Image (cartoon, helix red, strand yellow):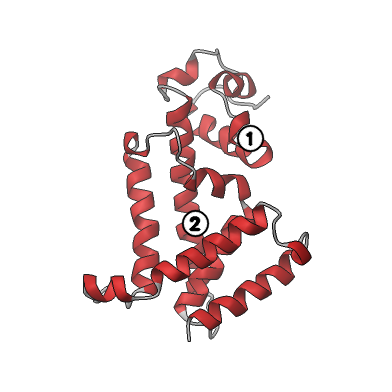
Amino acid sequence: MSDYHHGDLRNALLAEAGSLLEEEGAEAVTLRGLARRVGVSHAAPGYHFADRDLLLVELAAEGHEMLEASMRRALAEADGESDLVAIGMGYLRFALDHPNRFRLTFESAGLDPGRSERFMAASAATFRTLLTVAAGGPDATPDEQLAGPWLRAWALVHGLATLYLDDAVGPYRGQRERYLAAALAELRALDR
């Protein structure tokens, strides 16, 4: 049980839910279970989250924020790689480092992301970063952006992440660094 007593219950619930999500997956996150873990009444989470779905949408919003931060960090540390390759690797590293958060961030089936302004802003920021870098920069026209490699790049890294997380990569099973090296080669080929 957490040592939460008084203060910011909303953020305490989100932090505990994030930990539970990472450890056990979205199906393990319940409002009643979080109340127990944080040490408050079972009704207390309801003051901050109307229902479990809204809590999951907020966790997905955090996922978008974490993903964008990972892509931006990769850009800052590019070390000779193109921006497209850098953000692709930032995307892939986020997915492999936070598999359950990654899944929730993009699995919105049954959830209504429109209920959360935070989700809408965070997902737009993630998309804007991807589109700006992979589609010719912030000054590119909408037509130039749509003609850029952003969709292929996104499909590639998202697909590579999903294949690894679903344990469908055959000879790369359990060989994260070897898989990342193969992914890097694919991103470089796409960027030519």
At numbered mark 1, what does the secondary structure look like: helix, strand or loop? helix
Q: Residue at x 45, y 52 (%)?
A: 65
Q: What residue type is labelled 2?
A: Leu
Disc sitting over residue 87 in the figure: none
Residue 5: horizontal and vertical position, in percent? 57, 22
Q: Which residue is drawn at 54% across and 75% down?
A: 77
Q: Is residue 72 above or below residue 16?
A: below
Q: Residue at x 57, y 20 (%)?
A: 35
Q: Which amino acid does label 1 sit on?
A: Leu
Q: Which of 6 and 69 is in front in this view?
A: 69
Are the two marked residues, 1 and 2, in contact with CB atoms closer than 8 angstroms? no
Residue 63: horizontal and vertical position, in percent? 49, 48
Left or right placement of residue 138 versus residue 43 in this view: left
At numbered mark 2, what does the secondary structure look like: helix, strand or loop? helix
Q: Is residue 116 above or below residue 94?
A: above
Crowding at mark 2 (Cα within 10 Å: few <14, some 14-19, many 20+): many
Residue 14: horizontal and vertical position, in percent? 51, 34
Crowding at mark 1 (Cα within 10 Å: few <14, some 14-19, many 20+): many
Please tell me which of labels 1 and 2 falls first in the chain.
1
Q: Quadrant of residue 47?
A: top left
Q: Is residue 15 above or below residue 80?
A: above
Q: Which residue is drawn at 40% across and 22% down?
A: 50
Q: Which of 173 and 87 is in front in this view?
A: 173
Query: Quick one: quadrant of the N terminus?
Result: top right
List the residue tagged with mark 2: 67
The alpha-carbon separation of the residues under discs 1 and 2 comes to 19 Å
List the residue tagged with mark 1: 20
The total number of labels drawn is 2
Q: Is residue 124 above or below residue 37?
A: below
